Image (tube, grey):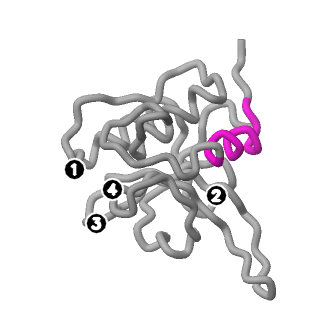
């Protein structure tokens, strides 16, 4: 059986977690999630047949932890191809990529001030929040697309 999920389903699942509190290694929306937890819980919501999870990482995970998690379940794509429903591997607070976010919109309208958005679990701000892609783009390393995304 081939798994398929739409970009809209991924975005809807991610948006349902907006405001959930940040908790290091959290995997439950009721008690808190971190950036990998966001991916795990979104995977659960969309009934993704594999598990995004990785366990037992430090407060500041090694740079390989999140990349390995993404590589298990996603295909790497160039940043220029990242669209709504795709995942960014990014640097946050350092030179090595130790963070992930989901792009939730592609909309651009300069006159109305609309730009692409992402959602992520931000430990510094204490919750899952939506922010402009432009705010983080200097930290982007690469993109990933969930296998079966249509």
**Nearest the eye: 10 or 68:** 10
**Residue holding disc 2:** 81
CA separation, marks 3 and 2? 25 Å
Q: Secondary structure at mark 2?
A: helix
Q: Are marks 4 and 1 in contact (CB under 8 Å)?
A: no
In this rendering, is residue 121 above or below 30? Answer: below
Residue at the extreme front:
30
Q: CA distance from mark 4 to mark 1?
A: 11 Å
Give the quarter of the image for residue 48: top right
Q: Earlier in the sequence, mark 3 or mark 2?
A: 2
Picture residue at 39% right of the left edge, 44% below the top: 34
Q: Mark 2 near mark 1, Cβ–Cβ under 8 Å? A: no
Using residue 68 as the reference point, say whether residue 78 is left or right of it. Answer: right
- Which residue is located at x 49 percent, y 41 percent? 38
In the displayed structure, 4 sits above or below 150; it is above
Residue at left 69%, top 53%? 84
Q: Position of residue 132 (x, y in %)?
A: 58, 70
Q: Position of residue 36 (x, y in %)?
A: 41, 40
**Residue at mark 4:** 97
- Mark 3 Cα within 10 Å, few/some/many (few <14, many 20+)? few
Say if mark 3 contacts mark 4, CB within 8 Å: no
Say which residue label 3 marks. Answer: 93
What's the CA distance linking mark 2 and mark 4? Answer: 19 Å
Mark 1 falls on what kind of element?
A: loop
Which SS class for mark 3? loop
* Residue occupied by mark 1: 60
Mark positioned earlier in the residue sequence (4 or 1):
1
């Amino acid at each position: 059986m081939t798994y398929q999920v739409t970009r809209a389903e991924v975005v809807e699942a991610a948006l349902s977690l907006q405001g959930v509190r940040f908790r290091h290694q959290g995997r439950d929306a009721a008690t808190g999630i971190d950036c990998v937890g966001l991916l795990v819980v979104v995977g659960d919501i969309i009934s993704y047949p594999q598990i995004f999870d990785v366990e037992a990482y430090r407060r500041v995970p090694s740079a390989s932890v999140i990349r390995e998690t993404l590589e298990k379940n996603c295909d790497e794509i160039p940043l220029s191809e990242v669209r709504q429903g795709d995942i960014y591997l990014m640097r946050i607070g350092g030179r090595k990529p130790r963070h992930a976010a989901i792009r939730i919109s592609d909309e651009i309208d300069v006159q109305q001030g609309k730009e692409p958005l992402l959602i992520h679990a931000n430990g510094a701000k204490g919750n899952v929040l939506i922010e402009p892609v432009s705010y983080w783009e200097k930290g982007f390393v690469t993109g990933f697309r969930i296998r079966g995304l249509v």
